[in-house]
Image (cartoon, rainbow, N blue to C red):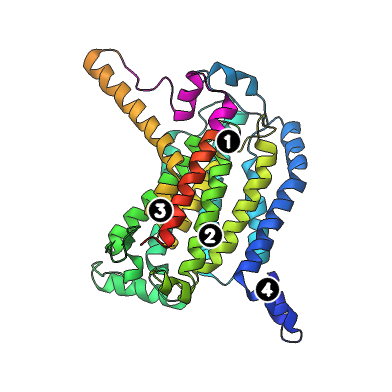
Amino acid sequence: MLLSLAQWLGQDARVFNVFNYITLRAVLACLTSLAISLMAGPTVIRKLTAYKIGQSVRDDGPQTHLVKAGTPTMGGALVLMSILITTLLWADLSNRFIWVVLVVTFGFGAIGWVDDYRKVVHRNPKGLSASAKFFWQSLVGLAAAVYLAFAVSAPGSAQILDLFLAWMRSGFEMNLPARADLMVPFFKDVAYPLGVWGFITMTYFVIVGTSNAVNLTDGLDGLAIMPAVMVGAALGVFAYVVGNTVYAKYLIFPYIPGAGELLVFCAALAGAGLGFLWFNAYPAEVFMGDVGALSIGAALGTVAVIVRQEIVLFIMGGVFVAETLSVMLQVGWFKYTKKRYGAGRRILRMAPLHHHFEEEGWKETQVVVRFWIITMMLVLFGLSTLKLR
């Protein structure tokens, strides 16, 4: 919005042409979303408290968390509001990738909102049923996956429909351009052609998987939001590289026209996340809820697919991956041992992983900060793939 205004004013005053630089708009987006979060945060918390939108704590969780009952939740709406306003202000609204990321983010946010609403209104800690949540996540994820298969492959918005029709005429057997291949970090010439079906399948699992992984991690004050900020900021760097012909060629990355604009979105996410952390830091004044966790995770997964860094996302989001695997292994082992021995056994004291460390005697703040440190190291390792190839 402001970019269009600056371009119009730039016809008469060249000073406004500075807003054409993505890097400047990214900095302004980060500051804008941070300011919105900090200024609107107290009002949002007061409203959530007034409407008695308090957190329900599971009976089977750590007993130390029972004191958190009643803390305002659904604070992720603050993050989404900051991201939306900032992106509409500073991003190029003619960019196809900006819109698909926004649609996915708010689509998953709507699913999370319904889940949180049921938890709050019906006082049911489980919220939306697992099958219903999975169905709607799959619907949004598959729609995004189909679109991105051609949006990433096409040189511009005008060619997306043509590419889709060509795929249909080919009997659904068409190959995608090299820019849609699965890139393997640390290797210059190693990439695996996915084909349309392979790309759609992988994209679906990345978006839905990352969304649920962030949601599983969101169990302690500040635990999920800071790693999401760091991973999102790093993905913004990748977006800037693959969206720039010079940097993409020099660093041996596929050039994806329009992807650089996602730096503005990632900056908005980082600023909004930091602003939310101000109120979510221990002891939390507000919780993110599924409305925030599901949407932020989906946003990270979508950006990673567009910039062709799915494996790097897996590395940088190692904490999210570990949390998810801990739940899968715990549940799988418990069911297997119960079927075989008649009594379920556990690998961890409690899942997800952060609860295991709490049960081991770590304080909540220790778990959170140490997971932050691990994420910071993993993000730096992921960023090293920019040059180490």
What is the quadrant of residue 72 in the picture? top right
| Residue corresponding to mark 2 | 236
Q: Residue at x 45, y 48 (%)?
A: 316
Foreground mark, 3 or 1, reads 3
| Residue corresponding to mark 3 | 312
Compared with 53, 266 (above or below) is: below
Q: Which residue type does callout 4 highlight?
A: Phe
Q: How packed is label 4: few (under 14 Cα within 10 Å), some, or many (20 or more)?
A: many
Mark 3 lies on a secondary structure that is helix
All told, the count of numbered labels is 4
Marks 2 and 4 in Cβ contact (< 8 Å):
no
Q: Nearer the viewer, residue 42 or 388?
A: 388
Q: Which residue type does callout 3 highlight?
A: Val
Q: Distance between the residues labelled 3 and 4?
A: 30 Å
What is the quadrant of residue 9 in the picture? bottom right
In the displayed orientation, state which residue is furthest to the front: 388
Q: Distance between the residues labelled 2 and 1?
A: 29 Å
Query: Which quarter of the rendering shows the C terminus?
Result: bottom left
| Residue corresponding to mark 1 | 116
Marks 3 and 4 in Cβ contact (< 8 Å):
no
Q: How far apart are marks 2 and 3 (CA)?
A: 13 Å
Q: What stretch is highlighted in magenta?
A: 344-369
Compared with 169, 325 (above or below) is: above
Q: Which residue type does callout 2 highlight?
A: Gly
- Left or right of 116 on screen, residue 171: left
Q: Can residue 306 be seen in this view?
A: yes
Instruction: Specify which label sits upstream in the sequence, 2 or 3.
Output: 2
Q: Which of 179 and 368 is in front in this view?
A: 368
Q: Examine the structure image and report whether residue 342 is included in the region drawn in magenta.
A: no
Q: How far apart are marks 3 and 1 (CA)?
A: 31 Å
